[in-house]
Amino acid sequence: MKKLFLSAILFLAPLSLFAGQYVGVNFGTGYLHQTKDSNSPKVGYRFGANYGYAFESDFRVEADFSFRNNEYSKRYSSIGTEVTSETSRDMHSWIMMANALYDVKLLETWSFTPYFGLGVGYAHNVEKVKVKSQVHSLTQKREDDRIAYQLIGGVKYQLADKIAAAVQYNYIVGRTHAKNHDVSVHLVRNF
C-alpha cells in the first residue's frame, strides 16, 4: 500500500512544475454486487480525494484514494416464534488507484464535458460478521489485500475559472466475487 502511494507521488511530483494540477474531493453512493451470495448488501456510501494533472491534450492522470462501506440486511434465526440469533455483516474497503482519464471536448455542450477513463491500484477489504444470541456473541473479521481496477465515466461542469463539479460512475473490481457500482459527486480545484 505504501509503495503504491509513494510511486504515485513520485510519478506526479515532476508535474508540479507546470500548471494543470488539481485536487478534488468526492462523495456518493455505492452498490456492492456479489456474484456468489444471494444476500446482497444494501446500498452503501463512499468518499475520497484525488490529486492529478491535466495535460493540454485533454488527458488527465490522477492518484485517487477512497473509502467504501456496505452493510447487509440482518438475518434472524428462530425456533418457532422465538428469535435465537441475529447475524449482521459489514464490508468496507480502502482503495488507492492510479487513473488515466480523457475529457471528450468534442462533445462539450453548455459547459458540460463528458469524460471516461480507467484505473488500476490496490484494495484493502475488510468483512466483519457479528452473530448475537441469547447465550453468547461472536465476531469474525476477514481481511484481504488485492489488485483492483476500475472503469470510469462521467460529466463535469465548470462552475468557475478554477473550480469544477462532476457526476461520475465507477465500475470497480477489487474483491473476490464482488463488484462495486458507484455514483458520486466530485468537486475539483484546479491550480
Image (spheres, rainbow, N blue to C red):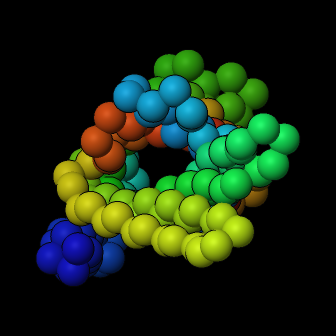
Residue 145 visible to the viewer: yes
**Against 135, is 20 above or below?**
above
Residue that sits furthest to the top in the current view:
107
Q: Is residue 31 left or right of residue 144?
A: right
**Against 155, is 187 above or below?**
below
Q: Which residue is found at the position 32% from the left and 47% from the top?
A: 174
Q: Residue 138's spot in the image, x, y percent? A: 51, 71
Pick the front one: 22 or 31:
31
Can you say which quadrant of the picture contains the N terminus? bottom left
Q: Residue 45's spot in the image, x, y percent? A: 66, 54
Q: Residue 142's spot in the image, x, y percent? A: 34, 64
Q: Which residue is found at the position 70% from the left and 34% from the top?
A: 111
Q: Which residue is found at the position 52% from the left and 39% from the top?
A: 32
Q: Which residue is found at the position 48% from the left and 64% from the top?
A: 128
**Against 63, is 39 above or below?**
above
Pick the front one: 176 or 13:
176
Quarter where residue 86 is shown: bottom right
Q: Is residue 166 left or right of residue 145?
A: right
Residue 184 visible to the viewer: no
Residue that sits furthest to the right in the current view:
81
* Picture mark count: 0
Pick the front one: 49 or 128:
128
Q: Residue 89's spot in the image, x, y percent? A: 56, 55
Q: Is residue 82 left or right of residue 78?
A: right
Quarter where residue 108 is shown: top right
